Image (cartoon, helix red, strand yellow):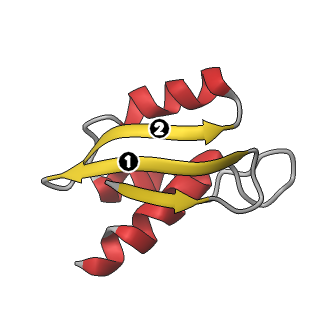
Amino acid sequence: MYSYVTKGVCSSQINFDVVENKIRNVNFVGGCNGNLQGISKLVEGMDVAEAVEKLEGISCSGKGTSCPDQFATALKKLVLSRK
């Protein structure tokens, strides 16, 4: 299991697994519960690089980042940088 402490967003942490380069069991701690459950369901089983491509750069309320963007950052730092 991977765990990433977010920066600049409402959620405080993202926990997830990666099995054979596919995203599994995404759980956001805090944040907009309904929206984050939706994101978690949408990325379930998605290829890591595809998720980064789709989520990176999304901004929330002019913050320059968002929970989806923070998840993309987590995937890049914790998974893609280790390949």
The part of the image, by quadrant, that contains residue 36 is top right
Residue beneath the point at 33% across and 59% down: 49
Within-10-Å neighbours for mark 1: few <14, some 14–19, many 20+ = some
Callout 2: 10 Å neighbours few (<14), some, many (20+)? some
Say what amino acid the circle numbered 2 marks. Answer: Asn
Where 82 sits versus 32, above or below? below
Identify which residue is drawn at 76% across, 44% down: 10
Q: Are marks 2 and 1 in contact (CB under 8 Å)?
A: yes
Residue type, mark 1 in image: Phe
* Image quadrant occupied by the N terminus: bottom left
Residue 3: image location, x then y, percent? 45, 57
Q: On the image, numbered disc 2 is attached to which residue?
A: 27
Q: Nearer the viewer, residue 32 or 76?
A: 32
Tell me the CA gap for discs 2 and 1: 6 Å
For this orientation, the residue located farthest to the left is 20
- Left or right: residue 73 versus residue 51 is right
Question: Residue drawn 28% across and 79% down?
Answer: 82
- Mark 2 / mark 1, whichever is N-terminal: 1
Residue that badge 1 annotates? 16
**As drawn, 37 above or below 63:** above
- Quarter of the image for the C terminus: give it: bottom left
Whether residue 11 sits left or right of residue 46 in the image: it is right
- Circle number at residue 38: none
Indicate the position of residue 38 as horizontal and vertical percent values: 51, 24
Q: Is 42 situated left or right of 82 in this image? A: right
